[in-house]
Image (cartoon, rainbow, N blue to C red):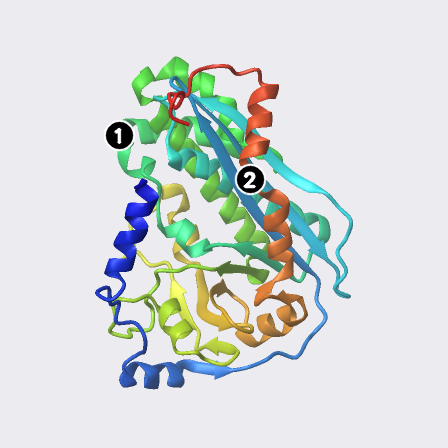
């Protein structure tokens, strides 16, 4: 019997013994959901909508990693018509084992996404800017470089390198990369990834700061998944799961105003401390038709639902779905990139793949 056969047999034997105990919610939880939930179907107002999404892929070799990261924006006018435009931010590069981390590649994608949002806002000035994910989460969850960097290295990055990134800030590239050679000249080789990663992290925060300064009042971050527990349901399950299991009708939960306060999270780099601590957003959960999503925004829930009502397809805003489908970097594309780069090295998977 193959491994597949053994696994299927084990699954059949386990079927009657595995019990998740999530078939229904306790009555007190359902009561609280009812108190928090506001049924609302929207008024179908006419607004222009922009949306951005990002993607990344990579191929690992024995001595390095090839990666591709990208972001794309789409725009729909107030009549709900998609504008025939093409706006991408892309980056392709090679990182050596010493330089590589999943966090850095995700930072590259994040920088491209936020810059594409800024670009979209400046070019088209939409009434709503949609982005997949969590803006607050991006701000308050620092990457590992913020903890790994030593004090003298932090001072070097913040006083010597970051001012140059600010001066050369552009919307079409990752500016921190312009200073890699300077880092290599001035720091030990084994500290390069931490110092470069921290500089990239500061550029990411700078991009978010610029976005919120220029268009914070119309940014709407939508999360399909969330571990947030802001309503104190006295459950180990996240709020998004509880609202979904409660089978609520279309509407939204009563918003909670979240301020990024020092007592809740770590100390930001000094250059951003004052800027981000004063920021606040409404967090709530929304159901357009069948699925629950978490929303972070400064806008009122009724305005968001009304604005997005006519764009909802399969319970999700079509502009975000279109951006997602347009930017996806699949394995076939990644193989083409590697071929164009004429990279022919061992991956370490030969003989087993």
Answer left or right for 283 relative to 73.
left
Residue 351 or residue 240, whichever sits in front: 351
Q: Is residue 242 above or below residue 104?
A: below
Which residue is at a point 55% across and 44% down the rendered structure image? 54
Q: Residues within 10 Å of mark 2 (few under 14, many from 20)?
A: many
- Residue 327 visible in the displayed image: yes
Q: Of the residues tagged 2 and 1, which is closer to the observer?
A: 2
Q: Is residue 16 above or below residue 89?
A: below
Count the labels in the image.
2
Q: What kind of element bears circle 2?
A: helix
Q: What kind of element bears circle 1?
A: loop
Identify the mark nearer the N-term, 2 or 1.
2
> Which quadrant: the C terminus?
top left
Answer left or right for 233 relative to 75.
left
Answer left or right for 99 relative to 80.
left
Q: Is residue 88 above or below residue 308?
A: above
Residue 35 or residue 152, whichever sits in front: 35
Q: Is residue 187 above or below residue 137?
A: above
Q: Which residue is mark 2?
A: 112
Q: Position of residue 325 (x, y in %)?
A: 61, 48
**Residue 294, which numbered label?**
none
Residue 348 or residue 207, whichever sits in front: 348
Q: Which residue is mark 1?
A: 150
């Amino acid at each position: 019997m193959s491994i597949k056969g053994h696994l299927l047999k084990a699954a059949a034997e386990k079927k009657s013994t595995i019990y998740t105990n999530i078939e229904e919610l306790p009555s007190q939880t359902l009561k609280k959901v009812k108190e928090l939930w506001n049924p609302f179907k929207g008024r179908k107002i006419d607004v222009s909508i922009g949306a951005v999404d990002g993607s990344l892929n990579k191929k690992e070799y024995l001595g390095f990693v090839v990666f591709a990261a990208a972001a794309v924006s789409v725009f729909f006018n107030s009549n709900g018509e998609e504008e025939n435009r093409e706006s991408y931010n892309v980056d392709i590069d090679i990182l050596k084992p010493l330089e590589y981390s999943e966090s850095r590649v995700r930072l590259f994608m994040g920088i491209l996404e936020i810059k594409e949002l800024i670009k979209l806002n400046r070019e088209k000035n939409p009434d709503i800017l949609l982005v997949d994910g969590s803006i607050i989460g991006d701000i308050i969850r620092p990457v590992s470089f913020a903890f790994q960097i030593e004090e003298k290295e932090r001072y070097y990055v913040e006083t010597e390198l970051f001012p140059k990134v600010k001066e050369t800030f552009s919307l079409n590239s990752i500016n921190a990369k312009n200073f890699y050679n300077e880092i290599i000249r001035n720091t030990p080789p084994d500290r390069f990834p931490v110092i470069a990663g921290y500089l990239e992290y500061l550029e990411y925060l700078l991009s978010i700061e610029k976005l919120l300064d220029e268009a914070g009042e119309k940014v709407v971050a939508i999360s399909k998944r969330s571990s947030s527990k802001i309503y104190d349901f006295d459950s180990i399950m996240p709020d998004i799961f509880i609202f979904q299991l409660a089978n609520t009708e279309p509407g939204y939960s009563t918003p909670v105003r979240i301020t990024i306060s020092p007592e809740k999270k770590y100390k930001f780099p000094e250059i951003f401390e004052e800027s981000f601590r004063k920021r606040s957003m409404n967090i709530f959960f929304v159901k357009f038709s069948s699925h629950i999503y978490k929303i972070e925004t400064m806008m009122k829930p009724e305005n968001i639902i009304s604005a997005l009502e006519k764009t909802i397809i399969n319970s999700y805003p079509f502009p975000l779905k279109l951006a997602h489908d347009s930017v996806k970097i699949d394995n076939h594309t990644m193989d083409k990139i590697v071929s164009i780069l004429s990279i022919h090295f061992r991956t370490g998977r030969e003989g087993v793949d």
